[in-house]
């Protein structure tokens, strides 16, 4: 049995969002050291503000300014901060009901230890030295001995100079991926520039990459079958937006490719042909990356196109 592989894996996607009038006012306000909430239909001041009433679903827009200080409603100690968290030293996650607000805001509290944190303690915002119109404009909360401010917040127009109209929120997941027996064998075969799948003992279909079990029959697979290296484009899309950190000029074609002998299409980039000439049924072959363990792209073989009936079940 081959050794099971394991490696760190990062999945990252920068999500770009356009802001409506409520969120734009809230984030621009943070840049200006102003905390805004929105009044719900029942009179509750929601901080952070939302665009629609959580009970009635009506659109909200009655903005008010609340105090930068408030009361901790609950908390949890974080002894080991992770990358990109608000503080790089141990801190408390706290829910803070700012004076004038009816709901609590989640953020970090800078405290020397868990014994210094308690429900009901007074805290205030510590503003970031450089503010850009993001939740990180609140660097954290810090203990505060001041008395509660007015319970009735002041109305606010939500108008600022140079308002923030959009944000980029990077979503990232770091984890260790263990592909398992079947996929480890598949990856090791790629080192030899071979593609192997596994055949289901019941339905006899060959899955590439192998999954270790048949997704249709639900039984374990173990019989290895070498497939390809040539295959057929079953369907495809034209990519017109350049991905971050991907050195491929657009437009390019990304396709589902059914390798000869396989009953499952895999993904691959098509090159060596103008993007507007790629078509279903196109016969292709792999082009391997120099010194790498994977196929860089697929190119046309020059063979006649495959008949639709030979790959229609894989579209």
Image: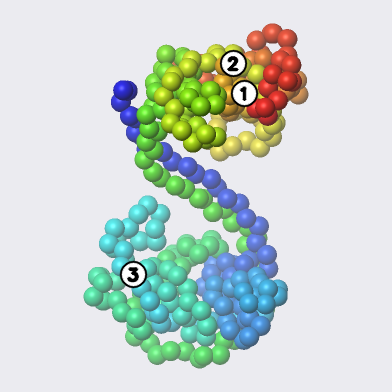
Q: Quadrant of residue 48?
A: bottom right
Q: Which residue is mark 2?
A: 260
Q: Earlier in the sequence, mark 3 or mark 2?
A: 3
The answer to whether the residues at label 3 and label 2 have Cβ atoms under 8 Å apart is no
How far apart are labels 3 and 2 at the CA level? 56 Å
Foreground mark, 3 or 2, reads 2
Left or right: 39 as drawn, with respect to 5: right
Closer to the camera, 212 or 116?
Answer: 212
Residue at screen point 63% across, 77% down: 55
What percent of the width, then of the height, locates residue 52?
66, 72
Closer to the camera, 107 or 230?
Answer: 230
Left or right: 237 as drawn, with respect to 269: right
Q: Is residue 96 visible?
A: yes
Foreground mark, 2 or 1, reads 2
Q: Which residue is mark 3?
A: 76
- Helix, strand, or loop for circle 1? strand
Crowding near the residue tagged with mark 2, few <14, some 14–19, many ≥20 C-alpha atoms within 10 Å: some
Q: Which residue is mark 1?
A: 257
Q: Is residue 34 visible?
A: no
Q: Give the residue furthest to the front.
A: 202
Above or below residue 5? Residue 24 is: below
How far apart are labels 2 and 1 at the CA level? 9 Å
What percent of the width, then of the height, locates residue 267?
58, 28
Q: Earlier in the sequence, mark 1 or mark 3?
A: 3
What percent of the width, then of the height, locates residue 254?
64, 28
Crowding near the residue tagged with mark 3, few <14, some 14–19, many ≥20 C-alpha atoms within 10 Å: some
- Helix, strand, or loop for circle 3? strand
């Amino acid at each position: 049995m081959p050794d099971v592989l394991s490696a760190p894996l990062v999945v990252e996607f920068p999500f770009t969002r356009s802001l409506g009038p409520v969120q734009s006012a809230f984030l621009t306000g943070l840049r200006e050291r102003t905390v805004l909430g929105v009044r719900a239909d029942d009179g509750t001041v929601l901080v952070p503000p939302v665009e629609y009433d959580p009970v009635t679903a009506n659109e909200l827009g009655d903005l008010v300014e609340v105090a930068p200080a408030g009361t901790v409603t609950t908390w949890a100690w974080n002894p080991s901060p992770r990358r990109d968290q608000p503080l790089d030293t141990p801190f408390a996650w706290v829910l803070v009901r700012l004076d004038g607000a009816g709901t609590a805001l989640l953020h970090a509290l800078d405290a020397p230890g868990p014994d210094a944190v308690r429900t009901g303690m007074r805290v205030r915002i510590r503003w970031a030295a450089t503010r850009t119109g993001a939740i990180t404009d609140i660097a954290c909360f810090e203990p505060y001995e001041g008395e509660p401010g007015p319970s009735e917040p002041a109305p606010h127009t939500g108008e600022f100079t140079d308002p923030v109209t959009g944000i980029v929120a990077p979503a990232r997941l770091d984890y260790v991926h263990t592909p398992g027996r079947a996929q480890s064998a598949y990856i090791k075969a790629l080192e030899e520039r071979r593609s192997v799948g596994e055949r289901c003992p019941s339905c006899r279909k060959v899955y590439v990459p192998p999954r270790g079990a048949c997704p249709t029959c639900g039984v374990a697979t173990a019989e290895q079958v070498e497939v390809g290296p040539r295959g057929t484009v079953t369907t495809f899309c034209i990519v017109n937006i350049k991905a971050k950190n991907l050195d491929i000029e657009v437009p390019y074609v990304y396709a589902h490719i059914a390798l000869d002998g396989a009953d499952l299409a895999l993904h691959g980039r098509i090159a060596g042909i103008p993007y507007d000439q790629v078509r279903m049924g196109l016969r292709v072959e792999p082009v391997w990356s120099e010194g790498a363990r994977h196929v860089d792209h697929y190119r046309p073989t020059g063979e006649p196109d495959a008949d639709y009936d030979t790959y229609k079940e894989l579209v």
